[in-house]
């Protein structure tokens, strides 16, 4: 029986690898773009996000060293030791304790949320900055960060001075400014996670929010992390607590791209979702992401390609057949709407809860 099972597994593995290798991803992508019901702009956007977020956070020893040199390592590990002593070494999940402390440290001690920048002249804020416009970065801002795409221009109501607020993307600049909104928060927190050798991925929501996940080796699953909210394993907070209308949620990691919309939308609140009309069907979406994964895993060995294919399948099954109902009943759950950002900004985004 074991010999037969081994033969069947080997045959299945070879059929999967043949399917992967025989797929011409360029031809499939072209066909997907020309299929009525599929939005070519959406396909191009996801392809662009893959080209960025599946690569930039990983495999940079220099950057990871810079992160570790900048943050307060003794404070982080002192708090970890306190928590381990509290729960006992036998019961402690060190990885979980580390991630929760990183969330706490990042939000409470390291990064700052910016509704409006402080005036560059008088240093005042408190809602006294009047937004004028957005414009392209100047030479100095481009030198600081070639990927800086937008600069917000404000005028102080008290002294009349103009303040420029560049939306920097590079981790080197974010380690200096330590400020931003959800885009900067999620990106910088990804660098934190990877610098601590955690298996992490970047989560993008079509309705303008981003966060992170890490893979728990003990629980054998991806766990939601939102550094803006200091939120751990609360995938329900968007569709339930914030009452945020969402459609697509995509995970970008260094080993693959996967549609996790069911995890954050359907399985959380079936009455609170937008029509997923950017792709003709879920099958079309799976076909599309399979092409991206083939390209991403091109340099992987056949064994690795098969292993990640199996992991994709298992995650897909878990999302389509969840074993538990998500609720806001966990001890650390955020009961109300979004906590980060000004009240006006949150309400304008439709994230204030019901």
Image (cartoon, rainbow, N blue to C red):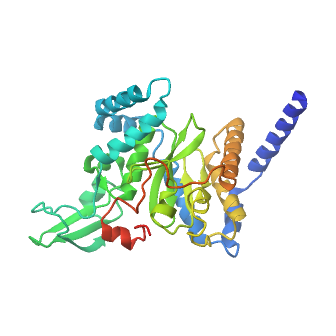
Q: Quadrant of the C terminus?
A: bottom left
The vertical placement of 290 against 164, above or below, is above
In the picture, residue 151 is in which quadrant?
bottom left
Report the front residue among 233 and 172: 233
Q: Quadrant of the N terminus?
A: top right
Report the front residue among 323 and 194: 323
- Please tell me which residue is depicted at 28% across the width and 67% down the height of the picture: 152
- Please tell me which residue is depicted at 86% across the width and 33% down the height of the picture: 5
Number of numbered discs overlaid on the protein picture: 0
Q: Is residue 309 left or right of residue 328?
A: right
Q: Residue 274 location, x and y as percent?
A: 57, 72
Report the front residue among 189 and 79: 79
Please say whether residue 60 is visible from this viewpoint.
Answer: no
In the picture, residue 180 is in which quadrant?
bottom left
Please say whether residue 41 is visible from this viewpoint.
Answer: yes
Q: Residue 83 location, x and y as percent?
A: 38, 31
Q: Residue 51 location, x and y as percent?
A: 53, 54
Q: Is residue 350 left or right of residue 270?
A: left
- Please tell me which residue is depicted at 85% across the width and 31% down the height of the picture: 6
Report the front residue among 243 and 255: 243
- Please tell me which residue is depicted at 34% across the width and 39% down the height of the picture: 67
Residue farthest to the top?
90
């Amino acid at each position: 029986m074991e010999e037969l099972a081994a033969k069947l597994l080997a045959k299945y593995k070879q059929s999967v690898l043949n399917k992967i290798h025989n797929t011409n991803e360029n031809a499939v992508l072209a066909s997907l773009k020309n299929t009525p019901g599929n939005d070519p702009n959406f396909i191009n956007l996801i392809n662009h996000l893959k080209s960025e977020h599946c690569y930039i956070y990983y495999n940079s020893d220099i950057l990871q060293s810079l992160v570790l040199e900048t943050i307060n390592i003794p404070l982080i590990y002192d708090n970890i030791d306190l928590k381990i002593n509290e729960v006992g070494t036998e019961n402690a999940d060190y990885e979980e304790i580390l991630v929760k402390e990183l969330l706490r440290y990042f939000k409470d001690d390291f990064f700052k949320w910016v509704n409006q920048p402080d005036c560059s002249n008088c240093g005042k804020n408190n809602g006294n900055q009047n937004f004028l416009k957005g414009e392209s970065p100047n030479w100095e801002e481009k030198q600081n960060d070639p990927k800086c795409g937008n600069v917000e221009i404000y005028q102080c109501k008290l002294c009349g001075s103009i303040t420029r607020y560049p939306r920097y993307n590079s981790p080197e600049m974010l380690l200096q400014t330590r400020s931003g909104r959800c885009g900067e928060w999620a990106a910088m927190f990804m660098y934190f996670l990877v610098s601590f050798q955690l298996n992490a991925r970047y989560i993008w929501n079509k309705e303008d929010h981003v966060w992170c996940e890490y893979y728990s080796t003990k629980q054998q699953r991806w766990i939601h992390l939102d550094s803006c909210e200091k939120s751990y394993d609360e995938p329900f907070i968007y569709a339930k607590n914030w009452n945020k209308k969402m459609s697509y949620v995509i995970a970008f990691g260094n080993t693959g791209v996967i549609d996790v919309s069911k995890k954050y939308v359907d399985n959380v609140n079936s009455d609170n979702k937008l029509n997923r009309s950017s792709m003709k069907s879920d099958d079309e979406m799976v076909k599309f992401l399979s092409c991206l994964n083939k390209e991403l895993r091109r340099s992987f060995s056949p064994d690795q390609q098969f292993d990640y294919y199996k992991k994709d399948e298992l995650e897909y099954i878990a999302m389509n057949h969840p074993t538990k109902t998500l609720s806001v009943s966990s001890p650390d759950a955020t009961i109300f709407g979004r906590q980060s950002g000004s009240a006006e900004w949150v309400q304008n985004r439709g994230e204030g809860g019901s």
